[in-house]
Amino acid sequence: ADAQDGFVIQAAAFSVKANAERAANSIDGFVQQSGKYFRVRKGPFANRGQAEAALAKVRAAGYSDAKVFTAG
């Protein structure tokens, strides 16, 4: 699947790329630039159940504002 499919978790957004990369590494995610921000994301997941399970782990890692949204 590519990032246009399924569900993605957004853990956080940073204005400094290095900080975003550090956060992405900590959750085995990736960084996606959006304007002047660097969004830390994980996925994609094929279905909401998988995404919710991963979301629980991301929140447990300290990203309490993380949320799931539909990719694409």
Image (cartoon, helix red, strand yellow):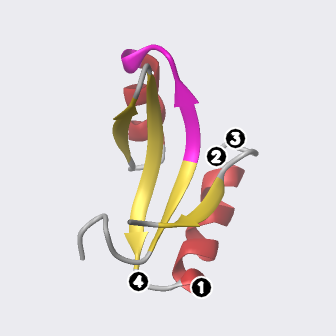
Residue at 55% x, 73% y: name it: 51
Q: Earlier in the sequence, mark 1 or mark 2?
A: 1
Q: Amino acid at mark 2?
A: Ala
Say if 31 sits above or below 47 in the image: above
Give the distance between the C-alpha atoms of the residues marked 4 and 1, in whole angstroms: 9 Å
Which residue position is annotated with label 1?
A: 49
Kind of element beneath mark 3? loop
Kind of element beneath mark 4? loop
Kind of element beneath mark 2? loop
Which stretch is magenta?
11-18
Q: Residue furthest left?
A: 2
Which residue position is annotated with label 3?
A: 62
Q: Position of residue 24 (x, y in %)?
A: 42, 39
Report the disc number at residue 61. 2
Q: Position of residue 57 (x, y in %)?
A: 62, 60
Say if 46 sits above or below 58 in the image: below
Give the distance between the C-alpha atoms of the residues marked 3 and 1, in whole angstroms: 21 Å
Marks 3,2: beta carbons within 8 A: yes
Question: Which-is-in-front pick, marks 4 and 3?
Answer: 4
- The 10 Å Cα crowd at callout 1, few under 14, some 14 to 19, many 20 or more, is few
Asked if the magenta segment contains residue 61, the reply would be no
What is the quadrant of residue 6 in the picture?
bottom left
Report the disc number at residue 46. 4
Say if 71 sits above or below 27 in the image: below
Q: Position of residue 18 (x, y in %)?
A: 37, 17
